[in-house]
Amino acid sequence: MLKYLLIFMLLVPTLSIAGEVRSVNFAAFQKVDKDFEFSPIVEGTFSDFIAAMEGSQILALAHTAGAIDGDVITLQTSVLRDESGSLGDFGVDCQLSYKDESTKEDTSFLLGGLCKIIKVGRGENLRKTLLIPHTNIPDTSQGFDGWFMLDEDEKTGIAFYANVSVEH
């Protein structure tokens, strides 16, 4: 019981500073058009964001409700396939740390961590880990609807985007 009380006491200051409960939105895309270029910032609503990604395909999309400082957000999507007795795999696997550094005067949210890109099978053997430094991500409740690119792997054509929105 004491353990739960201590955890609650540690979270109360964080929740009172942040004020509103936030959702972290995270997306991974892969180029399908070789001439398509990912933009570092995509302005607009969610539908504008998806429309701006024409030339790529969505690999993964996550909406994490009720995110608080220190949460680790995980996202994994892959296709496993038996290929002549060996296992093939293609996908992404991310573990991202969410930081809420907001004050009473200003909001500030960061997201960073590791994303693995895996392409194994059909003659490929790529296992790549991207280290995504903690990056400021936009708070859509502050008058800017948009998504920031966290990182892009040009070899595989995969890019990762994020933003924060108010939990309704």
Image (cartoon, rainbow, N blue to C red):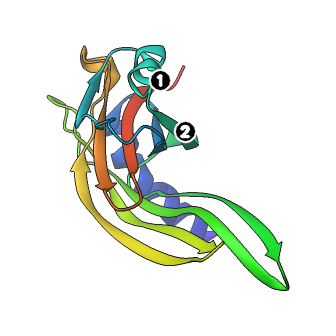
Residue in the foreground of this view, choosing between 30 and 23: 30
| In the depicted structure, whether residue 108 falls above or below residue 111 | above
Name the residue: 48% across, 15% down.
47
Image position, residue 37 (x, y; %) = 28, 37
Q: How packed is label 2: few (under 14 Cα within 10 Å), some, or many (20 or more)?
A: some
Which amino acid type is marked by label 2?
A: Ile
Secondary element at tag 1: helix
Which amino acid type is marked by label 1?
A: Ile
| Picture quadrant of residue 163 | top left
Q: How packed is label 1: few (under 14 Cα within 10 Å), some, or many (20 or more)?
A: some
Name the residue: 76% across, 67% down.
80
In which quadrant of the rendered image does the C terminus lie?
top right
Q: Is residue 15 visible?
A: yes
| In the depicted structure, whether residue 123 falls above or below residue 44 | below
In which quadrant of the rendered image does the N terminus lie?
bottom right
Residue in the foreground of this view, choosing between 111 and 21: 111
Secondary element at tag 2: strand
Whether tag 1 and tag 2 are in contact, CB under 8 A, the answer is yes
Which residue, given by chain and number where applicable, does mark 2 sit on? 58
Image position, residue 73 (x, y; %) = 51, 56
Residue in the foreground of this view, choosing between 102 and 85: 85
| Picture quadrant of residue 146 | top left
Name the residue: 35% across, 62% down.
155
**Distance (Cα) linking label 1 and label 2:** 9 Å
Name the residue: 14% across, 28% down.
105
Image position, residue 106 (x, y; %) = 16, 30
Residue 50 is tagged as 1
